[in-house]
Amino acid sequence: MSILAIDYGEKRIGLAIGEIGGLAQTLKVLSNSEKVVNKLGEICKEENIKKILIGLPLDSKGKIGFAAKGVQAFTGKLSREVQLPIEFVDESLTSREALSHTIRAGKKRKDRKNLDSISAAIILQEYLDNYTLKD
């Protein structure tokens, strides 16, 4: 089952893809524009996506804050477009972890353009790892 993970941001949306039992792979970073929901619908068809994970930024107490409300609003639009199961997953600290990965890999600041898709891959890999552990 192909799964698309989304790291939503007001400016950019990071995407990663993976399969149950496999590894998450970065896909791309999209500019967040009026047409992004349509573009995501096209990607879901092209990649034969069966489920979508969306990172939900919770506050330090695990509560939904301002940023999470923006993600929820975006998710409502997306669910009308794609007609696929969508699941929220906690994305706490994934952006920081993605930055740490790129620094350890020796990437210079100007070469860190895919941080959002790396964040999406981290979200997806954690889900895949936990899914495998449940079986």
Image (cartoon, rainbow, N blue to C red):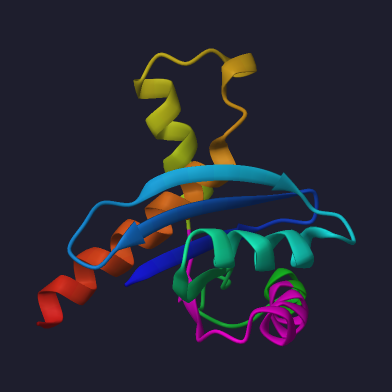
Give percent across and percent down for residue 105. Answer: 36, 20
Place of residue 130 in the rendered image (x, y in percent of width and height, measured from the top left) = 21, 72
Q: Is residue 114 above or below residue 124?
A: above
Horizontally, residue 90 falls left or right of residue 64, namely left
Residue 46 in the figure: left or right of residue 89: right
Closest to the observer: 29 or 73? 29
* Left or right of 46 in this view: 122: left
Say which residue appears at 55% left-offset and 70% top-offset: 54
Question: Residue 111: horizontal and vertical position, in percent?
Answer: 58, 18
Point 49% across, 62% down: residue: 5
Q: Is residue 58 left or right of residue 129?
A: right
Q: Position of residue 124 (x, y in %)?
A: 38, 61
The quarter in which the C terminus is drawn is bottom left
Q: Is residue 118 above or below residue 9?
A: above
The residue closer to the viewer here, 63 or 131, is: 131
Say which quadrant the N terminus sits in: bottom left
Q: Is residue 76 magenta?
A: yes
Residue 92 in the image: above or below residue 134: above
Q: How many marks?
A: 0
Query: Which of the two residues, 128 or 99, is positioned nearer the viewer here?
Result: 128
Magenta part of the chain: 71-92
Compared to residue 117, the image places residue 72 above or below, namely below
Query: Could you tell me which residue is drawn at 58 percent across and 71 percent down?
Result: 59
Q: Nearer the viewer, residue 85 or 111?
A: 85
Residue at 64%, 43% in the rendered image: 29
| Residue 108 magenta | no
